[in-house]
Image: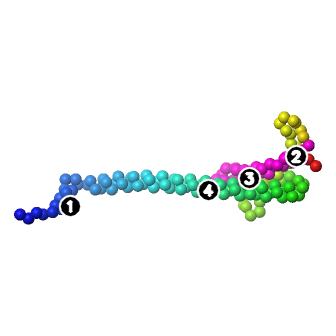
Amino acid sequence: MKRSKPHYNALRAGKPGFVLVEILIALAILSTVLLSVISGVSSSVYVISGMKNYTQAMLVARTKMNEFIVKNFRGTDLKDEQIKGLPGFYVSRETTRWEHPLLGPLPANITSIIVSWKERGKERSYKISYVYQAQ
């Protein structure tokens, strides 16, 4: 007697449509995984752009503070001045008499530089302060 190999279709003869169900389940799992990956990537892009703006604001504030120190702590206060080269970024500088929490008023001033910008419709800001002896 001659042995014949079973045909693939003969093995699947009792399970019609089973392959289609397997494919649909695989597609559902794959779409869930891809959805979570895309969500993670979009969150990463949001965080990276936010940190880029924060870093730019920090660099601008430090530069403005260094310019103020080089000018021997002289200059008028600024209020929402547009920063050249960075559209949407504004800088403010205010100097006030500094009071120590325990000792009270001292012959010192505090200068604060605030860089502000809008990010995705929300106001953001970075502030740097410097305390120095009043002249």
Give, as a three-letter code, the residue at label 3: Ser
Mark 3 is surrounded, within 10 Å at the Cα level, by few (under 14), some (14 to 19) or many (20 or more) other residues, namely many
Give, as a three-letter code, the residue at label 1: Tyr
Which residue is denoted by mark 3 in the rendering?
A: 116
The stretch in magenta equals 107-133
x and y, in percent, of residue 98 in the image: 86, 42
Measure the C-alpha gap from mark 3 to mark 2: 23 Å
Upstream in the sequence, badge 1 or badge 3?
Answer: 1
Give, as a three-letter code, the residue at label 4: Ile
Which residue is denoted by mark 1 in the rendering?
A: 8
Upstream in the sequence, badge 4 or badge 1?
Answer: 1
Upstream in the sequence, badge 4 or badge 3?
Answer: 4
Checking the image for residue 86, the label placed there is none
Mark 1 is surrounded, within 10 Å at the Cα level, by few (under 14), some (14 to 19) or many (20 or more) other residues, namely few
Which residue is denoted by mark 2 in the rendering?
A: 109
Upstream in the sequence, badge 1 or badge 2?
Answer: 1
Upstream in the sequence, badge 4 or badge 2?
Answer: 4
State which quarter of the image contains the N terminus.
bottom left
